[in-house]
Image (cartoon, coloured by chain):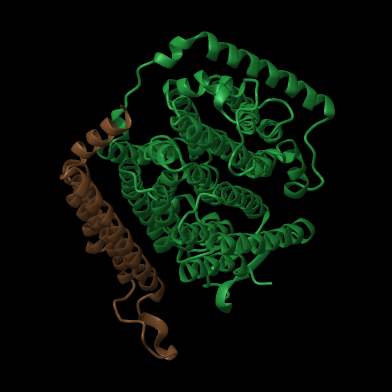
Amino acid sequence: MPPIGVAVAAVLFVIGVGALVIRRDLVFKLLALGLINSSTILLLISLDAQRSTMAPIVPPSVMTDVADPLPQALVLAAIVISFAILALALVFVMVLAERYHTTDALRIERAVARETKP
Amino acid sequence: MTLVAAPLVSVIGGAICLMMGRRSRWIAAFTWAISTGLVAYWIGVVARLGPVHETLGGWDSVGISLVMDRPAVAFLLIEQLLTGAVLAYSWRSELRSAFYALFLVLAGAVTALCMSVDMFNIYVLLELLTLTSFLLVAYERRPVQIWASLKYLLLASLGMSIYLFGVALVYAHTGSLGLQQVGDHLASLTAAEAGWIPVAASLITAGIAVKAGVFLYSLWLPAAHGSASAGVSALLSGLVIKMGVLALLRFSFILPIQHALTVLGVMTGLMGALYAIVETDAKKMLAFSTLSQVGYLLIGIGAGSEASRVGVLMYVVAHGMFKGLLFLAVGDAGQRLGSTELSVLRARRHEIPAATRAALLVGCAAIAGFPFVGGFWAKEWLLQGSPPLQQALLWLLMFCTTVVFSKLLPAGLARGRGGGVRHGGIPYVMLGAGMPLVFMLSRILAPGQATGTADATLVQAGWSLGVVAVGTFVGVKFRVLQRMRVPRSVFRIEESVLVMLFGVFVVLAVVLVTSP
């Protein structure tokens, strides 16, 4: 029986993808991407918590029932990466918004297509 | 010598570029020279002594492990060739230091990825590759580039999340991230315990396929590779997507995805060729042809024999060379003519510099599989290592490629000098001159083995010549093919996301159907 965190992660992922597809606003798309990244982080953490939720900061003698430290290290890397990606993507959305005065993906798509095909 | 030195050199060079500002191109060239020396050293070591393993930080079984083996050597070779050629190509374009810094960090990430055999390390480095190529695509800050790279970032990040889901599944069941340990653990499982493997395999395969330039997954690719500046396109098409292919190659040893890769290979080969045939812009056509060329690689990995893997590695090197050559040559011609439309290139071919025309001709011949140039030698190994069905598919892909490049070929056929090129043709020499020598690679990649006899090679040369002739004839004669209507809306973000998710289920279905 998987822990409830796994189910929540799956639900968050589906919501994120749904928002990524349905919302045309680029800012919402990026929020959706943040949600998707968070869902992977939650998945890693909750799979880890299956064994134990005790922090792995203990002397080696009581190593038996602490949480696995490796997923926590992975999660740190994943959080930083997702932050960097969102920050960069937001800058690009700003540049596009300044030029086209919209953050609507469809309008930008059309405007870019108009500019490239004279 | 430690394996970490090679990627570290590039990244440190990039940091120095940022610090110094001026003279960045000299720092980049110096860094390139050092890492070329390191790669040459490792090629020598691997060719003589076999693979070298290293675990970082002395954490024996739990540490991040690196390996320098034959696949890594092949990918490092093409990395050095392409980065050198792109440096020479952009030598006089007065790029800012930020470009060289990004360029060197990208090279460092690629070098590290070549040696990575740890699932999470592969994830981190693929994301680093995404970020650097994202910035390089948009380097000139044209809106079309910014839009293309934003799409790339969204889709690649989603793909990597899917990959991470698969990795989390694998880690939860096996307790390790090293490919070697995971493989050993999976081999010891009974059928009842292995129910989760198809799900994890499809998530991992689909996630990486987003970065590997596979149709259905990498629908961001035509816009990004088609709009970036010529040098960046050459790097992205020749090198960056190959890192996804390398990851798929490494995963194909431990996960049951051979058949899935064959299916993906056929699909990307044919769909990429279809879109390339109807494309009117030369750069975009090259980008679509990259999607199509990945098909050869995936079919070769899917065939699963030793010879076909050697063929895949040789094709990676050959494709990096001729696709880099073609992107640089089309970029040159586009700069001269002010447009990269195929009709413009053909109509005003006399104005294209003679060296560029020669590069176009060599590139077209090599990509089409013309005897004794570039791709021909790799295809010999691919064909030898494949079952009959895959062989037929490879010939079909070769035919499609020829039809595609019959559109670009006339642009290279003209007389007259047509003016010189700014870079003096050095990148063309770097990428083009080695083309007939690709067959030498098999000495390093498969020592002591040979493909058939000289007669067999001649027979294959005859067949290749025939396919090239028929393909060119069909491409030139049946212009109606180029007016086919194909759906364009799949390249919008929303549709690309949906198609990619559909692709996860495609892989899952194939893995489930073909697993015993």
x and y, in percent, of residue B23 in the image: 54, 64
Left or right of B287 on screen, residue A47: left
Residue drawn at x 21%, y 52% is: A32
| Above/below status of A39 relative to B502 | below
* Drawn side of residue B44 relative to residue B512, left or right: right
Which residue sits at x=49%, y=70%?
A: B20
Front in this rendered view, residue B375 or B9: B9
The colour of chain B is green
- Which residue is at 40% across, 82% downward? A64
Above or below — where is B486 with respect to B490?
A: above
Residue A1 can be seen in this image: no
Residue A38 in sight in this render: yes
Q: In the rendered image, which quarter is residue B503 located in?
A: top left
Residue B309 relative to residue B143: left or right? right
Residue A116, given in percent of the width and then of the height, sits at: 32, 32
Q: Colour of chain A?
A: brown
The residue under the point 66% across, 44% down is: B426
Q: Nearer the viewer, residue B260 or B477?
A: B477
User: Between residues B33 and B336, which one lies in front from this camera angle?
Assistant: B336
Q: Quadrant of residue B433?
A: top right
| Residue B496 image point, x, y percent | 31, 38
Indicate the position of residue B175 as horizontal and vertical percent values: 45, 66
**On the rendered image, what quadrant is the N terminus of chain B found in?**
bottom right
- Measured along the vertical axis of the image, is residue B280 above or below residue B508? above
Number of labels in the image equals 0
